Amino acid sequence: MAQRGLSRRVEGIGEGSVVGTLSKLLQLSCEAVLVFDGSGRVLLVNEEASRLFSVPDSLVGTDVRLLFPSGGDGELGPFSPEALPFPVDGTAARTTCTAASGRPLEVRVRCDTVRAPGETYLLLALPTGADELSDREAERTIEDLRRANHRLSGTLNIVLDTIDADDLQALFGRVLEEITETMEADGTLVYLSEADGFRLRGVSSSLLGERMARFMPFGRSLERFAVRDGRTVRLRVVSPSAESLRQGRLTMREVVSEETREILRVRSSMLPPFTSFMVVPVWFGGHVISIIEVGWRRLHPLPKEDARLLDSVAHYLSVQLASAFTALRSQRADRLASLETELREELLDAATAGSEEGSLERIDAVLREAADELEAALVLVGEGGDQRHAVATLPLSGPSELPVDLDELAAPHLRDGVAVAPVPVDSPLSSMLRDLGEPCVGALLDLGELAGVRRRALLLRPDGAEPLDELETEFLYDLVSDCRDVARGEEAREQDKRIAQALQTGMRNELQDVEGITAEAVYSSATAAASVGGDFYDLIRLPGRRACVIMGDVSGKGVEAASVSAAVKTALGAYAWEGLAPARMVRSLNEFLLGFSRLETFATLFVGLIDLSDSTIRYCSAGHPPAIMVSADASEISILDVQSGVVGAFHDIAYQDGVTRFSPGDVLLLYTDGTTEARDPSGAFFGEEGLRDAVMRECADGRPFEGFVGRLLGALDDFTENNLDDDVAMVALRFD
């Protein structure tokens, strides 16, 4: 059965139960048990074997012939089962081994082959003398008492060392080491519960440098067993099948419960670096606040008594962990709230005092202070050449293009115009930074556009560091919102100045002289029955070889339409000088119109920002007829077809920018809907096709640009027989 990435089943005959049975047999048997392969190498032993045989190091990996010396002093030759001092057909035999005391010891041995991949043998050995058997049983009893005493002593140490602990890191450090030592394990991990799952908060020193899951989502990892059962669960990683090994990299592994024989399929990346391990839930107030994992790298017995002992330790630790964690969390929240207030006051004081330092520089300084508090590096992000991939100035590598769409990364986390988007450790961005040796754990800070510039930064911690937690993320949200609000306040004051200046320039349609652009325009008023006064256009020269072309059509009649047109044109002129993107200009104008005029008054707009340096036009067409681009040789005509809704009709309309390129000699034609909706005496529309035909005709055969829009208007008059039903405005720009 599969559920949210997990697959569970019950282990049965043919599915690994033999392994579980053998593990239990090794634990319970009074006989020494050895498993060795066709080369004589010992693969598996139980504790009785470890106590019976004498070897300098671990029994596992030892040549089995060294345990049963033949008396020769020469080097061991190639292994042959027939050369062993006992048969391998399952019959009993007596032989001599070297005991742990170093003395020869007579033992009764039975050895037989095991049906398994490869050549495998199972050997059972038991001392033959009554005294030896009695000694072995006494040693076993003493070992059990030693283990029980060790467990009790370790548990008392945990209790005594954690009384009144208020340093969470120190508490984790002591507890993890003492649990590892008490359980005679290879290592211990601890995870703490957060909003979206369990985050790794500590490992024993023996596991430093090991690869392990830093985050376990709720219900999709090993914690599910323990939370469901409400107590410690004993788990074992199943050896991969031959078929799985043939498939290459093991992305999924099977983990079996030693108690229920249930099997859980989990991602390899979610497993601790153990073969046998116990997952211990720490409960507090009816919720699991922590998960502790204690394990062994090799197959190891997992007694029920050890699981019950760990449950007792977890029950005691729950109060200690909860109180210490709550106290630290409260202290951290107070510290971050205080810092956020201090940084906001810094920004406000500088803005009020009219500091010579620019607002963006002040924001960068404030964000760096926040990064220092969070033990992270601040990496500023600028726009890339293709406007999709941004460029970041990395601490070690310098300017580098980021291989992700930051808008897409920030979008799910946008809140009131700003975003704090986590950078997942397995994301392409984090992987790219990690490969460069850069900090790669943290978040993207997106402040939106400030002073006409998209302001973004990465706040990054080194590889392996903790991800930002909830408190830190909320702190950053509040801080970037403060930065945006203060910067927008300064922008609003500057905008008021520019609008006041723009209002003094008059309301006439005009095309300013822009070096590199030849411009023509024509306006024709309709009959008395038409909606008059609503069409307008403008060409504004901007610094840095840039210009802004505007064309619009306001609904309504007479004075109201004319006054709204004047207000719209004036506001757009001010927005253009602010350096806003076209979609941002139109969005601001939408809110302005909804507050300025009656609900039934709306406008269609084309706003284009022309950059002569890189031959691009960034435009927003809001319900306006699509602009036309004609190639220099009149061989090709294209439509600027990125469209948005009308302006002044509804709140929260989404406006988007389009981008197109031009070459020397290309011509851009803008027009109002009165052009395509003009009718002939029979009622047929001039239409977009008629306009395109007229455009191609008036551009063909080397006809001069001068008089281009006049000739188009003449064609329209001929079509309608000089009887327009609506105003007509056309603007043509040739890029020289």
Image (cartoon, helix red, strand yellow):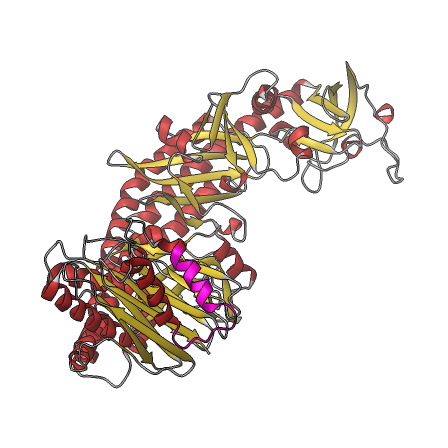
Q: Is residue 373 magenta?
A: no
Question: Residue sitting at 39 percent across and 64 percent down?
Answer: 459
Q: Estimate the x, y position of residue 660 in percent, counting from the top left.
A: 44, 64
Where 518 falls versus 147 (above or below)?
A: below
Q: Is residue 468 visible?
A: no
Q: Is residue 311 visible?
A: yes
Q: Is residue 694 magenta?
A: yes
- What number of labels is visible? 0
Relative depth, front residue between 171 and 242? 242
Where 322 falls versus 408 (above or below)?
A: above
Relative depth, front residue between 226 and 661? 661
Q: Quadrant of residue 525?
A: bottom left
Question: Residue sitting at 54 percent across and 49 percent down?
Answer: 210
Where 59 falls versus 731 (above or below)?
A: above
Span colored in magenta: 690-707
Relative depth, front residue between 622 and 427? 622
Question: Residue sitting at 48 percent across and 73 percent down?
Answer: 703
Q: Quadrant of residue 479?
A: bottom left
Q: Estimate the x, y position of residue 668 in percent, counting from the top left.
A: 41, 68
Relative depth, front residue between 203 and 183? 203
Q: Quadrant of residue 597?
A: bottom left
